[in-house]
Amino acid sequence: MAAPRRPAAGPHGGTGPVAVDGSPRRPRVLIAPVTVTPTKALGLSHLKGLLWVDVMYRATRSLTDADYLYNHTAFNITRQTAGFWEYLDRACPDIDPSRCTEDDVGRLYTAFQAQPSPPPDGALQPYVRAVEETGWTHPVSRRVLEIWRGHYDWLGLYDPGITRTMPPRAGLEEVVEYLAKRGLCLDARRDGGPVYLDATAQGLPLRAVTSATGHPNYLGCALRDLVPMLERYDEIVLVHDRELTEDYILLQKIFGALGADTHRLGLSRVPLDGVVRSSRHGVDHRHTVAGLADEFGTRGSTDAVRLGMRLYFIAALGKGSGQSFRMDLLGEFIDRAGKLLARDDAPEAPDVAEFLRRNTGGRAFVDAYRLTSALLGRHRRVPLKALTSSLHG
């Protein structure tokens, strides 16, 4: 792997990116969210994250050369996913994946998480080898991903390749060696310990990215995909759950030390009646994407439902978790979206590119919250009709 080069100065540092011949070029942006493991139904918090990233990516690619990294294959070797697959084959050998619903899989995942002890690394190795060698995915997870593709179609989400096999861009040993040479990694496996990310020089504690036997956790998997890509982009945007903030601050520091201009977007999960619940404890069907489709599938036009979802989960709920989910309020936003779409754009409304640039906050990427909030402004000139097809067409 080549060492990443620090990008040319962006909006806050004078001139923008330039080509080899010195002429201006469009910025290159990589948007890399945490993936949702294909072991459960898509819930409200998953939906919130997917909608934020979708709006950010679709809007940003109108202004830059943007890529959206969402690679299930890279994370299928984690204990969370490979461990679930081992549980399925051990505890449910007669399961018929073709007849599984998301709710069925979610109940099995809850049972897996309730086990008194996790499976040992040795039990996961056949699954790890199958993923590494062929990109294999367990039939139950393949079924889940196919169901999700239907949800993506209903919501008008861009599909970054959720069912595609995409091997990580580097091996674990290659990444460990690369980081260790730069003082950013401590390999303690010879002494019976794990591999650590090391940003102690920047005031952060060591963080293990593998087990003592070398099995990578989700951070180790993310490094295999992201580190080889850093040099290609002017800005990197990491999107994550707020519960993972410490880990993503660490990634931001590591990538910064490698010369990458890295930003973070932390999103809180969606509370129900004031309480944030993890999907590992089970999700009621009504609070899944499938449940929302049952509730709102015929509420209005396709565009109204798609826009209303974005207005509610982004502009209304915001980044934090201060508001609990309200089915009635989501319905009101869908109705409001229908009314907005019924209006003609004002003649003096700016063109789409200019409107999007106003919502970047000075960065190369568009701020999804600023953008969707601007759509609700009563006295603002918004090119809504022109935006609709680009944001969720």
Image (cartoon, rainbow, N blue to C red):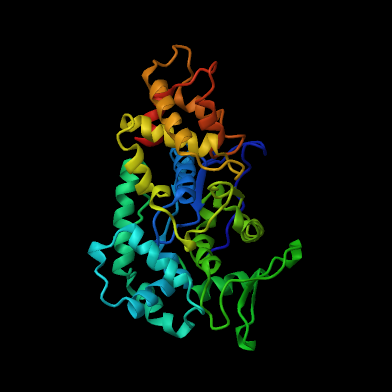
Residue 1 in the image: above or below residue 86: above
Foreground of the two, 243 or 202: 243
Q: Residue furthest front?
A: 273
Query: What residue sits 40% from the left and 21% below the top?
Result: 339
Q: Residue furthest bottom?
A: 191
Query: What residue sits 44% from the left and 43% below the top?
Result: 54
Q: Is residue 158 visible?
A: no
Give percent across and percent down for residue 111: 43, 70
Query: What residue sits 42% from the left and 21% below the top?
Result: 340
* Count of numbered circles on the image: 0
Foreground of the two, 261 or 106: 106
Give percent across and percent down for residue 223: 53, 65
Foreground of the two, 352 or 102: 102
Q: Residue furthest top?
A: 347
Left or right of 205 on screen, residue 180: left
Q: Is residue 52 visible?
A: yes
Left or right of 360 on screen, residue 382: left
Q: For the C terminus, which image quadrant?
A: top left
Res 131 → quadrant: bottom left
Query: What residue sits 30% from the left and 59% below the top?
Result: 101
Foreground of the two, 268 or 166: 268
Give percent across and percent down for residue 59: 46, 36
Left or right of 287 on screen, residue 188: right
Residue 382 in the image: above or below residue 124: above
